[in-house]
């Protein structure tokens, strides 16, 4: 069938649905360089403003899957995906936990972009660790060792990869229909039978409002079920950075210490690893349930906790590091640290978490565009949590850096903390489970 791209753009601009054939024509044409970027940009912007119907989202997801290869595993497999946040490193903890329970975890992850981090960058901060595996090797490793970490490959959903690159530079990333098709197409093509999604909302997430996260969750739940996946979705808060560290090698250090059952108490007696650990266990418990190894998520949580505290998860992580070439004893460390103290007293009401993410980008711990270099040793240590009482002169942050840090950057970091005169409630990490 021949369609006119301009007429399809006009049709969507008017709010009318596109047929599966029209969508396939446009996506295939763009992927094969027969439709130019400016026309795909126009269609993406029309979708951004007019949305997609439930059928269009389903059709677009299938078209993206069909654009590349798919994987099928022997034995139970469950994957996890997060929509991204600042300090989000749970994949590196829950992956080994679930794998140690005998469930395959095909962990295909992305790089950091914008103010949020990426699992691939964290792993590649470990000298020698290779995330560039062929699909056959990836499949074999999951089936034999129950876990493999790889970067997103061009073989899986190449149409989505090309379209996402264009979305990033045309301000159309925050489209719930496009996010749904993008994430679900990759996760379905990847072949896991079960899927746990961590949809983040709040100041450090792409989606700022809980209602946006809930809408995305409902869309993803519907698509997952239509494709026959066992699926559970968590809505979690990104009102403050997750855990103690933000920055690639620093986050690996946090994960290792959690896997070694080490807490880290702040001067106020608060375990700064508690939120990372708890969210990892909650997600892992549900993955264990979906993988058929427990009778309920609650029972899965108990199993996950036992596997963590016994050291089995740590051993699994170390085994995977060895197989994929990682030398954990050579983890890079920044040359300098700069301590930042509070200039006022009060109670921590919240953070401008997105601003913290952009400060991390300025420290070279993240990237503005995909070609930007990343310094794996740089980042932040965050020593306060929402609800904490802080006195003037108390330590708020420690900056880990190799290049000089400007006074304006340090000032901006202090200003990311929102203070109140009275004690504030602590952040509710898990808001809803679907």
Image (tube, helix red, strand yellow):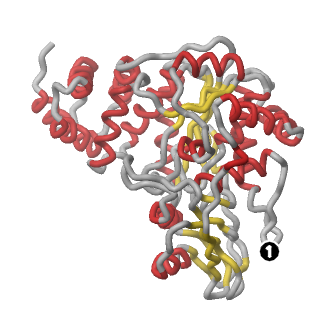
| Residue occupying the point 20% across, 27% down | 33
Helix, strand or loop for disc 1: loop
**Which residue is rendered at x = 65% and y = 21% of the image?**
142
The x, y position of residue 433, in whole percent, is: 64, 41
Quarter of the image that includes the N terminus:
top left
Residue under label 1, please give it: 267
- Picture layout, residue 72 above or below residue 5: above
Instruction: Locate residue 421: give its quadrant.
Output: bottom right
Asked whether 310 or 252 is in front, the reply is 252
Can residue 285 be seen here? The reply is: no
Quadrant that contains the C terminus? top right
Please indicate whether residue 355 sits to the left or right of residue 396 in the image. left
Q: Picture coordinates of residue 360 (x, y %)?
A: 51, 62
Nearer the observer, 40 or 149: 149
Instruction: Answer whether residue 419 is visible to the viewer in this image.
Output: yes
Q: Residue at x 57, y 76 (%)?
A: 418
Task: Count residues near mark 1 (Cα–Cα under 10 Å), then give few for <14, some for 14-19, many for 20+.
Answer: few
Give percent across and percent down for residue 59.
35, 22
In the image, residue 406 above or below residue 175 = below
Answer with the quarter of the image where residue 35 lies. Answer: top left
Going 78% across and 69% down the picture, which residue do you hit?
266
């Amino acid at each position: 069938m021949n369609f006119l791209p301009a007429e399809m753009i006009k049709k969507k601009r008017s709010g009318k649905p596109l047929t599966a054939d029209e969508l396939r024509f446009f996506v295939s044409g763009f992927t094969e360089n027969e439709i130019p970027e400016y026309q795909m940009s126009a269609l993406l912007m029309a979708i951004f403003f007019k949305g997609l119907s439930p059928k269009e989202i389903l059709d677009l997801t299938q078209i993206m899957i069909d654009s590349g290869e798919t994987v099928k595993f022997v034995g139970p497999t469950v994957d996890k995906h997060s929509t991204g946040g600042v300090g989000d490193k749970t994949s590196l903890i829950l992956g080994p936990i679930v794998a140690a329970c005998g469930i395959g975890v095909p962990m295909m992850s992305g790089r950091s972009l914008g103010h949020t981090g990426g699992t691939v960058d964290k792993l590649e901060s470990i000298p020698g660790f290779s995330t560039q595996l062929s699909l056959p090797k990836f499949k074999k490793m999951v089936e034999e060792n129950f876990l493999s970490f790889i970067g997103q490959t061009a073989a899986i959903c190449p149409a989505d990869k090309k379209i996402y690159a264009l979305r990033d530079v045309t301000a159309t990333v925050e489209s719930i229909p496009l996010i749904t098709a993008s994430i679900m197409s990759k996760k379905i093509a990847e072949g896991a039978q079960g899927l746990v999604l961590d949809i983040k909302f709040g100041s450090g997430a792409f989606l700022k409002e809980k209602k946006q996260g809930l809408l995305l969750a409902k869309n993803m739940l519907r698509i997952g079920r239509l494709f026959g996946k066992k699926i559970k979705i968590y809505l979690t808060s990104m009102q403050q950075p997750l855990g103690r560290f933000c920055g690639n090698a620093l986050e690996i250090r946090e994960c290792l210490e959690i896997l070694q059952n080490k807490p880290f108490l702040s001067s106020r007696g608060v375990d700064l690893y508690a939120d990372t650990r708890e969210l990892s266990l909650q997600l892992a418990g549900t993955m264990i349930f979906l993988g058929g190894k427990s009778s309920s998520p609650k029972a899965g949580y108990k199993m996950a906790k036992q596997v963590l505290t016994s050291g089995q998860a740590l051993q699994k992580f170390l085994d995977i590091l060895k197989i994929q070439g990682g030398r954990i004893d050579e983890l890079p460390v920044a040359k300098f640290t700069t301590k930042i103290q509070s200039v006022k007293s009060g109670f921590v009401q919240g953070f401008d978490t997105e601003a913290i993410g952009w400060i991390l980008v300025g420290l070279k711990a993240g990237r503005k565009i995909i070609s930007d270099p990343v310094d794996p040793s740089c980042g932040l240590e965050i020593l306060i949590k929402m609800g904490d009482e802080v006195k003037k002169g108390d330590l708020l942050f420690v900056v880990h850096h190799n290049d000089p840090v400007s006074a304006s950057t340090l000032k901006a970091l202090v200003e990311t903390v929102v203070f109140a005169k009275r004690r504030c409630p602590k952040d509710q990490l898990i808001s809803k489970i679907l």
